[in-house]
Amino acid sequence: MPYRSGISQSANSDQVEQELYKLMTMQTRVYIVHMSSTIGSILFTKAKELGMMSDGYAWILTDGMANIINSISPLVLDAMDGALGVRFYVPKSKELGYFTTRWTMRYKQDNPNDPPTEPSIFGLRGYDTIWTLAQAAEKVSMINAISQKQQQRKNSTCLGTLGMSTIGPKLLDAILQHKFKGLSGDFDLTNRQLQFSIFQIINVVRSESKEIGFWTAKGGIHRNLNQNGYKDTYLNSIPDLSPVVWPGEANIVPKGWQFPTYGKRLRVGVRTSGYPEFMKVERDPVTNVTTATGYAIDVFEEVLKQLPYAIPYEYVAFDNAQGVSHGTYNDFVYQVHLGVYQAVIGDITIRYNRTSYADFTLPYTESGIAMIVPVKDGTTKDTWIFLKPLTTDLWFGSIVFFIFTGAAIWLLERRVDNSELTGPISRQLAIAMYFPFFIDKERVESILSRLVIIVWVFVLLVITSSYTANLSSMLTVQQLQPTVTDVHELLKKGDYVGYHNGSYVGDLLEQLGFDRRKIRAYNSQDDFADALYKGSKNGGIAAVIHEVPYIEIFLAKHCKGYTMVGPIYKSEGFGFVS
């Protein structure tokens, strides 16, 4: 429980009202009432007047009031409409019915002008206690009861002069050993304490108590008790409980919190990002209220909605901080350490050096640092482009397989004395090499030779298809290649590089070995695009070193002519600071 409100038993209505006003300034809207019926009646009457028994509130009664709910004034019950309570369960029995009838008749005789009431659990307990004492007294013989006077002492009270019975311990043992089923249920004082294992959950609806379900130590919450007895297992589960009517006659379960009427708001620092998609801060010139929009704001507000309690907050622009104008993100985060803000949100990178004076949440974006570089068209527009697919490996493989096929046919045809293979060896080899190109079944007599030619035709088909596919790709698909593929290449060439103004990436580039004179800061995406278009040799830059979330936004806008290379450096992503 986040707060305990102590109200004196002798407190008047004004003091109770003052305490209720204090509760209204807090965000919690669930109250557990643990007090007597006298002060509790004043509490609920005042809560009704202050509007605290309306929609959104939840009141839970402990057994102090719930056990005597039927004896409370109807006016107070009307004020308690919608409250939940937990009280001891009294099982119904014939003896209890007879006793209730006699009690009601006797009460009407003694109090003819008062409305009828039912005996409370405390009255039933008292009746069972007297019955137990009477049964124990009958069991213990009182004939030999002797009272021994205690020794007189100076300054003793009158109680000190009383005698002590010698059968007192026996009477006590008889009471503790006596067990029976009384009006209030099983009466057992074995451990010198009545043990209640079943509680009834009630709901005050229209000045009456409505049964919701039962709670047991072994089985939890159930709708009904088993007919075999309340010590056995129970039927039905929690979803089958009777519906609860909450304060304000609402059927929806209160969320348990609300923005307090008064209270200090959480100061959340915001600043406009170079990428408005992440954070954009505006100030209303009339009301002077700061508003913020963007992806970071959407994440922050969605997280607050998921919390089980309310956090009142207000956005405060970084430009309004005392003594601070447009500064770096390190300055922005340091404002939390100075106490200017309780939290800062935005596109803030989780850095090790910043954790020494601020705490970060888990990252909510992709991490890493990469490069934005121009791309060059790798498409070859040469007239001899049809020779490009014929690589060295393809040439070599085709020639080897061609020679192997011709040699195999020549050897196989010589075994069958082919008439074509006559004359000098040079002529025979020329004819054998002729077969793979110009297949003539009449000139090839061996069946094995024809099988070799079939394999060769299949290989030739594969080579032709591969060549056609590669040539088509070269003629139709644009081949875009990054101008730079490694950050060390930029260092080696001495090219200019750019980064976002105010970012820690500038210091990181110096750590990587870049000359400070070769590092240029820019403020917007368009500045990056213009600098990359000019190039390093014409007053621009060869690459932009940036964080991956920013690069994705840049490429979404400038999708032609640029690409991402990397990540080249590991970072933890963006997070919130508290």
Image: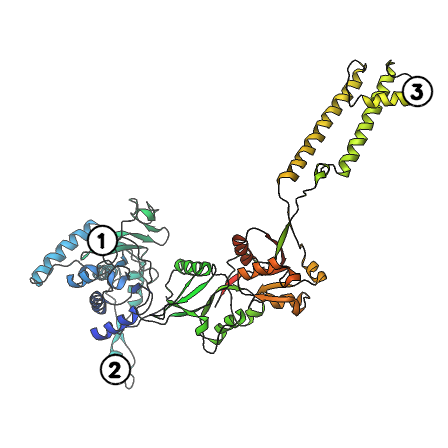
Q: In the image, residue 550 lies at what x, y percent?
A: 54, 58
Q: Residue at x 7, y 60 (%)?
A: 109
The answer to whether any part of residue 184 appears in the image is no
Q: Residues within 10 Å of mark 1 (few under 14, many from 20)?
A: some
Q: Earlier in the sequence, mark 2 or mark 3?
A: 2
134 or 554: nearer the viewer? 554
Q: Position of residue 252 (x, y in %)?
A: 29, 53
Nearer to us in this view, 47 or 389? 389
Q: Which residue is mark 1?
A: 210
Q: Quadrant of residue 374?
A: bottom right
Q: Nearer the viewer, mark 1 or mark 2?
A: 1
* Residue at numbered disc 3: 424
- Which residue in the protein does label 2 denote? 157
Residue 564 at x, y percent in the picture: 60, 54
Q: Quadrant of residue 349?
A: bottom right
Q: CA distance from mark 2 to mark 3?
A: 150 Å
Q: Quadrant of the N terminus?
A: bottom left
Residue 500: assigned label: none
Q: Is residue 472 left or right of residue 287?
A: right
Q: Relative to residue 21, is residue 328 drawn left or right?
A: right
Residue at image location 81% in from the left, 31% down from the top: 400
Residue 40 shows in the view: yes
